[in-house]
Amino acid sequence: MKNYKQYFVMYPSYSVVLSRGCNGNCSICGGGANIAKKVYNRPKISTRNPKIVVNEIIKLYQQNKIEIFDIIYDSCSTKDILTIKIIEILGKQFPKKFIFNIECFRLPNYKLIDAVSKHLNKKSVIIISPNFAQEKNRKMHK
């Protein structure tokens, strides 16, 4: 992209944080499960209510015309359906309106892929970020 700053002026986006805490203890991060337990007394991930998140997204759209949202949460866990619920609720009220940039630290499950394709704008992306190019490094640091 030639002019990165211009892109964000023309297409404003907003980062949506869906949780606090982490299940991992990666060596490259200071916010892992062990630290969260010791410092914040948070023994597990604390997630936000999907309906509250949807209301915030709708408010940002109505007041500021923001249609692009960066989802800050590992949405690709096979057990987690938080992001999927949010996508489905928004899709019913605003079909194909919003663009989500969803970062995953593992391969996404089919339910997430299906929800994105059914309910979000076709410009939405699922970004797979394994953190390390070499498998031996990933295993050592993860």
Image: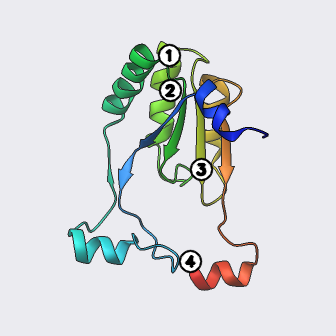
Which numbered disc flags the more N-terminal residue, 4 or 1? Answer: 1
Which numbered disc flags the more N-terminal residue, 4 or 2? Answer: 2
Amino acid on which the number 3 mark rests in the picture: Glu
Measured Cα–Cα span from mark 4 to mark 2: 31 Å
Measured Cα–Cα span from mark 4 to mark 3: 17 Å
Q: Given contact means CB atoms under 8 Å apart, are the residues at marks 1 and 2 in contact?
A: yes
Q: Given contact means CB atoms under 8 Å apart, are the residues at marks 2 and 3 in contact?
A: no
Which numbered disc flags the more N-terminal residue, 4 or 3? Answer: 3
In the picture as drawn, the residue positioned furthest to the left comes out as: 41
Q: Position of residue 114 (x, y in %)?
A: 65, 34
Helix, strand or loop at disc 1?
helix
Q: Is 91 placed above or below 26 here? A: above
Q: Which residue is denoted by mark 2 in the rendering? A: 88
Q: Which mark is residue 103?
A: 3
Of tags 2 and 3, the one toward the viewer is 3
Q: Which residue is denoted by mark 1 in the rendering? A: 92
Crowd band around label 3 with a 10 angstrom C-alpha radius: few (<14), some (14–19), many (20+): some
Q: Position of residue 38 (x, y in %)?
A: 24, 77
Crowd band around label 1 with a 10 angstrom C-alpha radius: few (<14), some (14–19), many (20+): few
Measured Cα–Cα span from mark 1 to mark 3: 23 Å
Q: Which mark is residue 142?
A: 4
Which numbered disc flags the more N-terminal residue, 2 or 3? Answer: 2
Amino acid on which the number 1 mark rests in the picture: Lys
